[in-house]
């Protein structure tokens, strides 16, 4: 097939491509990944809401600024003269309860049995904003919108298991949060209708209120964000210290300004950055994206690190790639914010830069979901050979985007970006059209 640049109107007229409804705002770029030759473009330099394809920008920025082997180090330090233990937040995402327990055991082993201490948690390396500009407060109770904190417990998501089997309704939660206030107003009823409110943002402590009905002799699992992860981290650490024979008198927030002469009792090491980015992109974990973006800010010397400074760094990167396109807007690193604006060309150039890097191109590609295999593409484009498309998806209630690399039937490698802004509630239909277009490209090229 000869490479030609076509408009959406021309493609619709000729009937060579799956039909896109005329009331959908459309941006599209298809490029040869090897030569950069433009094969198809529809509004390539107009600005759209990118949704979670913003994570491609965050991935490229993080690999360029931090490197794929970057490790977070969350340190525990003891001031023996003041009787104080300090947990210094590093901004690491996905610290597990088991890692907290091991760090407490290592700290207990370094201290005198039966000694008494005050425990401080330090989160001053990050700004205090737990949510980003453009994140609707109605989303704060949803699993895709956990708070962004310098000290985190897992992904700051609580798993709730509700069972009505037997004579008594039971509610379990994981991880075990010492400060959790769980208010259960659920009752048994003929149909499942559960409403959950997440509160405690102002107080910095987790409050969850369950209301509604659960059918008898059944069970369900809910995932909800919770407020106050740093305090919960410190409380979990304190409980483990006490179980190991170390007394804790007080647990409170406190800034550690000078580490000279302090005893380092434990260091919680994260997975390498490219592993965290893989988790971020495969499953579109917004919290990881925001933590990584603030880490770029931190490593560039911003203390406290902030989302805005991370976005500024990402914007400078985009400006170097496409200096003529100055109307972009970045408000977060995950794409949840409705304030973000990017063009299809921005995403195409990010994919080109990331996949072609001789330093970490392999890691960049490995972070992306694979059609018919894993992540957010595991049940999409299943008519294509598994692995034919690697890319990032994005969804808001009126936005559907996909951007990635396609190995076409001829073996040719294509960069594909499709951005739709659609009437509310049509995102599932938009995904189907996107998948049909990708399949058409696979067959045509």
Image (spheres, rainbow, N blue to C red):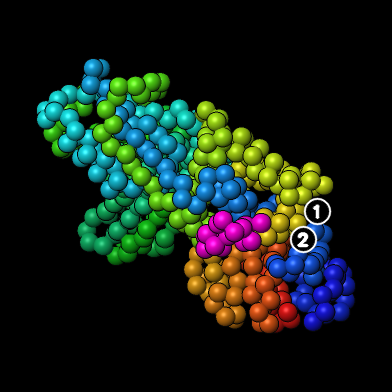
Mark 2, Cα crowd under 10 Å, few <14 / some 14-19 / many 20+, is: many
Residue in the image at 52% along x and 28% along y: 304
Among the two numbered marks 1 and 2 on one chain, the one whose residue lies closer to the N terminus: 2
Quarter residue 217 falls in:
bottom left
Numbered badge on residue 46:
1
Quarter residue 15 falls in:
bottom right
Residue at the front extreme of this rendering? 358
Mark 1, Cα crowd under 10 Å, few <14 / some 14-19 / many 20+, is: some
Distance of label 1 from label 2 (alpha carbons): 7 Å
Examine the rendering and report whether any part of residue 232 can be seen: no
Give whichever of 4, 248 is nearer the camera: 4
Question: Secondary structure under badge 1?
Answer: loop
Disc 1 and disc 2 in contact, CB within 8 angstroms:
yes
Magenta segment includes 358: yes
Give whichever of 378, 444 is nearer the camera: 444
Question: Secondary structure under badge 2?
Answer: strand
Residue in the image at 37% along x and 38% along y: 74
How many marks overall? 2
- Quadrant occupied by the N terminus: bottom right
> Measured from the top left, where is residue 216 in percent x and y?
32, 63
Numbered badge on residue 27:
2
- Quadrant occupied by the C terminus: bottom right
Q: Is residue 217 left or right of residue 28?
A: left
Numbered badge on residue 20:
none
Q: Which segment did they paint magenta? A: 353-367
Magenta segment includes 334: no
> Measured from the top left, where is residue 389 in percent x and y?
60, 71
């Amino acid at each position: 097939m000869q490479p030609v640049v076509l408009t959406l109107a021309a493609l619709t007229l000729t009937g060579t491509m799956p039909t896109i409804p005329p009331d959908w705002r459309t941006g599209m770029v298809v490029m040869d990944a090897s030569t950069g030759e433009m094969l198809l473009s529809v509004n390539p330099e107009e600005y759209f809401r990118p949704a979670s394809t913003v994570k491609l920008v965050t991935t490229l920025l993080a690999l360029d600024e931090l490197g794929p082997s970057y490790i977070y180090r969350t340190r525990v330090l003891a001031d023996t003269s003041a009787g104080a233990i300090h947990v210094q937040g590093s901004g690491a995402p996905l610290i597990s309860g088991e890692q907290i327990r091991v760090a407490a055991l290592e700290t207990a082993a370094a201290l005198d049995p039966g000694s008494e201490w005050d425990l401080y948690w330090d989160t001053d390396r990050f700004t205090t904003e737990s949510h980003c500009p453009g994140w609707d407060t109605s989303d704060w109770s949803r699993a895709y919108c956990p708070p962004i904190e310098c000290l985190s417990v897992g992904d700051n998501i609580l798993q709730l298991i509700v069972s009505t089997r037997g004579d008594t309704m039971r509610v379990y939660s994981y991880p075990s949060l010492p400060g959790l206030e769980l208010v259960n107003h659920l009752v048994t009823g003929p149909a499942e209708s559960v409403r959950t409110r997440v509160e405690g943002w102002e107080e910095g402590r987790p409050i969850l209120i369950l209301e509604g009905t659960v059918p008898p002799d059944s069970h369900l699992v809910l995932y909800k964000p919770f407020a106050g992860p740093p305090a919960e981290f410190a409380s979990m650490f304190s409980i483990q210290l006490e179980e190991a024979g170390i007394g804790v008198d007080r647990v409170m927030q406190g800034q550690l300004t000078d580490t000279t002469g302090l005893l380092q009792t434990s260091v919680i090491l994260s997975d390498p950055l490219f592993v965290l980015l893989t988790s971020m992109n495969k499953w579109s974990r917004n919290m990881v994206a925001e933590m990584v973006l603030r880490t770029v800010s931190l490593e560039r010397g911003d203390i406290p690190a902030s989302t805005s400074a991370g976005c500024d760094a990402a914007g400078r990167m985009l400006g170097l790639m496409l200096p003529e396109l100055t109307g972009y807007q970045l408000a977060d690193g995950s794409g949840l914010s409705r304030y973000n604006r990017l063009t299809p060309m921005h995403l195409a150039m990010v994919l080109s830069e990331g996949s072609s890097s001789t330093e970490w191109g392999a890691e960049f590609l490995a972070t992306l979901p694979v059609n018919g295999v894993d992540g957010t593409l595991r049940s999409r484009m299943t008519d294509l050979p598994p692995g034919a498309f690697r890319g990032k998806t994005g969804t808001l209630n009126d936005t559907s985007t996909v951007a990635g690399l396609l190995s076409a039937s001829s073996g040719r490698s294509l960069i594909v970006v499709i951005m739709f802004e659609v009437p509310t509630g049509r995102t599932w239909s938009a995904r189907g059209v996107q998948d049909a277009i990708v399949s058409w490209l696979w067959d045509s090229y």
